[in-house]
Image (spheres, helix red, strand yellow):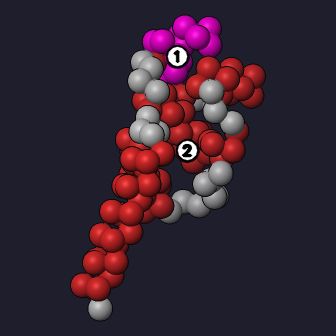
Amino acid sequence: MIELAKFIGQRIRSHRKARGITQEQLGEKVGIPQSYIGSIEKGQTYIQLDTLERLLVALDINPSDIFSTYKISNNAKRLEKEKHLDGLYALLIQRDTEEINMVEKFAKEILKTIDLYKK
């Protein structure tokens, strides 16, 4: 259960930062203290469903945006990978579709090059 709390916290933080909102601003929107937002984002507290729902509404996201990549596992490498992917998501979410397509094309080319060097 602790892993799930950390996962939810990471996803909340990622979406909050992607929208340029501080913990304090999010707390004001949701009606909870900034310190509680911080505890949620660090996975230090179990979030109640009504609080999670208010956070999702405040961040204008769907539950699937939080849980779509969650798998029960104690794999530290997977968690680290998800942290990096959340960072990429935060970089891209505020970009327009054309810019995202351009980044995707560059990423595919870079990965092809990496795969060639691995052989």
- Secondary structure of the residue carrying numbered label 2: helix
Which residue range is magenta in the image?
A: 24-38
* Residue ID at (45%, 40%): 96
- Label ID, residue 7: 2
- x, y (%) of residue 8? 58, 39
Q: Farthest residue in the right direction?
A: 50
Q: Nearer the viewer, residue 60 or 100?
A: 100
- x, y (%) of residue 17? 42, 29
- x, y (%) of residue 109? 33, 71
Q: Quadrant of the N terminus?
A: top right
* Residue ID at (43%, 48%): 98
* Residue ID at (48%, 61%): 78
Side (left or right) of 21 relative to 64: left
Q: Which residue carries the number 1 mark?
A: 26
Side (left or right) of 90 relative to 70: left
Question: Three-letter amino acid code at disc 1?
Answer: Leu
The crowd level at tag 2 (other Cα within 10 Å; few <14, some 14-19, many 20+) is many
User: In terms of image quadrants, where is residue 55?
Assistant: top right
- The number of numbered discs placed on residues in the rendered structure image is 2
